Image (tube, rainbow, N blue to C red):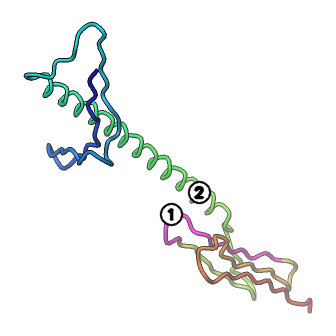
Amino acid sequence: MICVPLVRIRTGQGDATGVLSTGSETVGVLYMDSRISAADLAGGNRELLQTLAIEASTVLENARLLEEERGKHQMEEELRLAHTIQQSLLPPKLPDGGWMRVAGSSVASHQVGGDYYDVTEVNAHCWSAVLADVSGKESARHCWHRCCRER
């Protein structure tokens, strides 16, 4: 029986690839067993097994990096979708004629924010306005409602 550790490989710039120290960076083991003959670690067999273990470790690291990249792409796609949904919740047009003129915008510090606003006409002399931070990320949370009495 022969066991060779599979160690975590650190990929670098260009052709620079290195093996991290074993110990806590061991990701598996290359296990070979033969019931026919005893293992011979003399000569180049040990180097051959160590090279094979490094190659297997490289394949495992590449698979880990690929999975990490896929996760990042999925997260970015979900953030784009959340941004689109958030923008669709904001009013397409605000009152800009008569005695009531309103302007507003929401610019997220990241891809998705938690700001929300809307203004709705209740009747000819009464409007309802909402301004809110719905994400809870900011310390200030605002929400107010104002309605004028009919004249």
Q: Is residue 141 above or below residue 11?
A: below
Along the horizontal axis of the image, is 11 left or right of 74? left
Looking at the picture, tell me which residue is in the foreground, 12 or 147. 12
For the N terminus, the image quarter is top left
- Mark 2 touching mark 1, by CB under 8 A? yes
Highlighted magenta segment, given as a residue range: 108-121
- Which quadrant holds residue 34? top left
What kind of residue is marked 2?
Answer: Ala
Residue position for label 2: 82
- Specify the farthest residue to the right: 150
Along the horizontal axis of the image, is 123 left or right of 113? right
Tell me the element at label 1.
loop
The stretch drawn in magenta includes residue 113: yes
- Which quadrant holds residue 142? bottom right
Looking at the picture, tell me which residue is in the foreground, 34 or 151. 34
Q: Position of residue 131 (x, y in %)?
A: 70, 79
Q: Earlier in the sequence, mark 2 or mark 1?
A: 2
Q: Is residue 4 above or below residue 26?
A: above
Q: Position of residue 110 (x, y in %)?
A: 49, 67
Circle count: 2
The disc label shown at residue 38, or none: none
Q: Position of residue 140 (x, y in %)?
A: 63, 84
Residue position for label 1: 111
For the C terminus, the image quarter is bottom right
Q: Residue at x 52, y 55 (%)?
A: 80
What kind of residue is marked 1?
Answer: Gln
Looking at the picture, tell me which residue is in the foreground, 5 or 107. 5
Tell me the element at label 2.
helix
- Count residues near mark 1 (Cα–Cα under 10 Å), then give few for <14, some for 14-19, many for 20+: few
Q: Residue at x 57, y 60 (%)?
A: 83
